[in-house]
Amino acid sequence: QVQLVESGGGLVQAGGSLRLSCAASGIAFSINTMTWYRQAPGKQRELVAAITNGGNTDYADSVEGRFTISRDNAKGRVYLQMNSLKPEETAVYYCNADVLSITDGYLEVWGQGTQVTVSS
């Protein structure tokens, strides 16, 4: 079974930076698109940034130019560098991956989430 584990969340002041990391583990033939989502209290989960296994990226308009998504295919990791953070970006950040598993076929896998709190 493929699992995703996020790390790197925490408390930061407005204007500060954080780097989130997500590591995939388990038996996977390939990991395709990896995506970061976030969900603020009382709001719907929203896409923050995505990256294909070929390195093509996509960002929410609200984070374009401030956040950078990257991945290390050899290690099965995806990263999210977040700069110039704003208080309204306080949320639980989730890692998501489209995976082809040797044992289970195509799967959409979610991590447990990591809390990011931006103080004003």
Image (cartoon, rainbow, N blue to C red):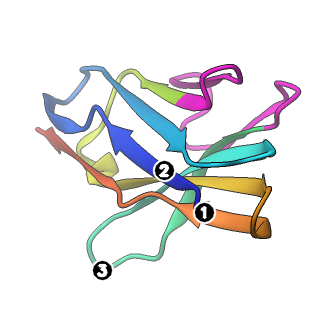
The residue most toward the front is: 103
Residue 50 x %, y %: 69, 42
Crowd tier of the residue under label 3, counting other residues whose Cα lies within 10 Å: few below 14, some 14–19, many 20 or above: few
Q: Could you tell me if residue 65 is visible in this image?
A: yes
Residue 72 is one of the magenta-drawn residues: yes
Residue that appears at 72% across and 48% down: 28
In this rendering, the answer to whether 2 lies above or below 32 is below
Q: As shown in the figure, which amino acid type bears the numbered disc 1?
A: Val
Residue 23 x %, y %: 48, 36
| Residue labelled with disc 3 | 42
Answer yes or no: do the residues labelled 1 and 2 have beta carbons within 8 Å? yes
Crowd tier of the residue under label 2, counting other residues whose Cα lies within 10 Å: few below 14, some 14–19, many 20 or above: many
Residue 47 x %, y %: 60, 56
Nearest the eye: 38 or 106: 106
Could you tell me how far apart the alpha carbons at marks 1 and 3 are, in whole angstroms? 23 Å
Tag 1 secondary structure: strand
99 on left or right of 48: right
Tag 3 secondary structure: loop
| Residue labelled with disc 1 | 109
- Name the image quarter holding residue 84: top left
Q: As shown in the figure, which amino acid type bears the numbered disc 3?
A: Gly
> Which image quadrant: the N terminus?
bottom right
Could you tell me how far apart the alpha carbons at marks 2 and 3 are, in whole angstroms? 24 Å
| Residue labelled with disc 2 | 4
Nearest the eye: 17 or 64: 17
First in sequence: mark 2 vs mark 3? 2
Residue that appears at 16% across and 37% down: 10
Residue 55 is one of the magenta-drawn residues: yes
